[in-house]
Amino acid sequence: MYQKLWDVMRRVVVQKRFFHDQVSQGRIHVKDSQNSLSTTNLGTDKKDVNELNANESYDSLKEELADAVTPLWRIPYHEQLKIKNQRNFEIMVKLTKRLRPNSNSSNIICQLKETLPSPVTLHYRNKNEFHIRYDSDGRAVVGLCVGKASKNTLRCITAEKLLNTHPFHSNVAQHLQDYIQHQSKWKICEHFQRGGNWRGLTIRSNYKNEQMAIVTIHPQNLTGEEIHSEMERMKDYLLACPLSNQLVSIYYQACLHTRCTAEQSPFILLHGQSHIYERIGEYDFRISPESFFQVNTQGAQLLYETVARQLAPERLSTVVDLCCGTGTQGLMVARHCRGVIGIELSRSAVEDARFNAAHNQIHNAEFFAGRVEKLFRPLLEQLDAAPDIAVIVNPSRGGVDDRVIELLRSNQRVRHVVYISCQADGLAMNNFVSLCHRPTRKMNSEPFVLRKAIPVDMFPHTDHCELVLSFRR
């Protein structure tokens, strides 16, 4: 059904482009408001043809970018949810086959709920990471890339028409693009070895529509004074633009690598506040330039409430939040349990988590910076007196290290694990299997049982979905 719908939409787009091609060549003429057509060659004015071609090319590029970034944008949202329901069912079938390879049953391994819809479907992203590249005409563009460099098809397209991107973010990108095109003498850094300086722009915003801009550059052989002078000119240009009163924070980072942490290359504050604050329910959270925070704030509240209900910690439970980011999830359950301990790789995110705990007057939460696989064992040893341990696991797409799963299985006081996965059919599925498989010589501890899977749509118009899995034993 959905494939047929998709094919119909594709045909409509092709027909639309064909019509514009015929108009631009003068073979089709719109005679009146009823759109009756003539197929005689009318020698369309060259200026009109150029404008039509430019508009058609513009529309075509926007649609190509929308198809790449938001591939479900042509489909009504209620139909998108049906597609995601089917996709999540297929994921659970795959997991069931891995855990029960000899079973002939058509049933999946646990209860699978219908996808919870996002509370907001348009312009929901509170963070956008834009590229700075040249287009096919050699003009600087601050947008998103489609295609592949290896095939010489890589193009950068402005993102102002995307359904998931806030217009405020696109406005800042457009102003930076104008500055680079007309004011700056710096070149764009497409390859580190070929020189150039401009690399990227990240925009973060909050519920007040306050915006933080982080510009990434490559320093090449520039002196610190040269870099600072150019960044000051850029800052002044951005602040002179319309709606600049909402641009409350401007940073830059001189990065020598594909991506740099704050420890590798500090973020330099050019203007305004060092942080912005986001609100989820009754909690306020501090956001720094590299903090991890869910890109859909209203969707995040739905996700965290779902996790809290599945975790359901008791008053004497200790909650361990692995890959905790800025502490959002753990802090939202802290008042319902004995205490929360979070582990996160990013030091700046841990600093934000500690600040967030104090800012929200939560005094039973601690956060530590480091790798989960290294800190989790000594943490469990320190919790030897805790009668009950509930664990939240919210890693990147690749899941957590096998050593973490072994520790979860071997500690009998861990009776409940809630796992949040953004790519459940990827490497993270190995974690699910390891939590649930029968005891082996290597891992002879009691397995967990997957009780429930709840999809939460955090990314409308895309094919991505968060999956909350509740494991108990």
Image (cartoon, rainbow, N blue to C red):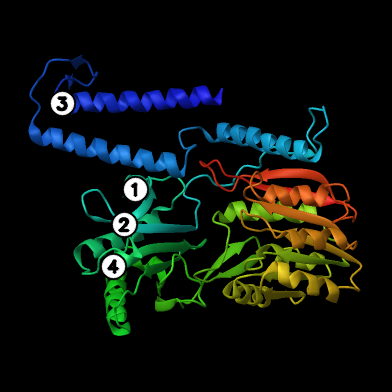
Q: Nearer the viewer, residue 449 or 229?
A: 449
Q: Residue 242's x, y, as percent?
A: 30, 63
In terms of sequence position, does the residue under pointer 4 or pointer 1 come before the other? 1
| Disc 3 + disc 2, Cβ < 8 Å | no
Q: Distance between the residues labelled 3 and 1?
A: 28 Å
315 horizontally vs 254: left or right = right
Residue 353 drawn at (x, y percent): 64, 72
Compute the Cα span from label 4 to label 1: 19 Å
Q: Which of marks 4 and 3 is in front?
A: 4
Q: Earlier in the sequence, mark 2 or mark 1?
A: 2
Residue 68 location, x and y as percent? 43, 42
In percent of width and height, residue 285 lies at: 60, 68
Q: Is residue 306 left or right of residue 240?
A: right
Q: On the image, which quarter does residue 113 sit in?
A: top right
Residue at the spot of label 3: 25
- From the image, tell me which residue sits under label 4: 195
Judging by the rendered image, the residue that carries numbered circle 1 is: 154
- Compared across the picture, whether 48 is left or right of 471 comes to left
The quadrant of the picture occupied by the N terminus is: top right
Identify the mark nearer the N-term, 3 or 2: 3
Does residue 214 show up? yes
Q: Tell me the SS state at disc 3.
A: loop
Q: Is mark 2 on a helix, strand or loop?
A: strand
Nearest to the observer: residue 470 or residue 47: 470
Q: Mark 2 points at which residue?
A: 133
Say whether disc 4 or disc 2 marks the residue closer to the N-terminus: 2
Amino acid type, callout 2? Arg
Query: Which residue is pictured at 74% across the width and 43% down the height?
Result: 453
Query: In the figure, 2 relative to 394: above or below?
Result: above
Q: Are marks 2 and 1 in contact (CB under 8 Å)?
A: yes
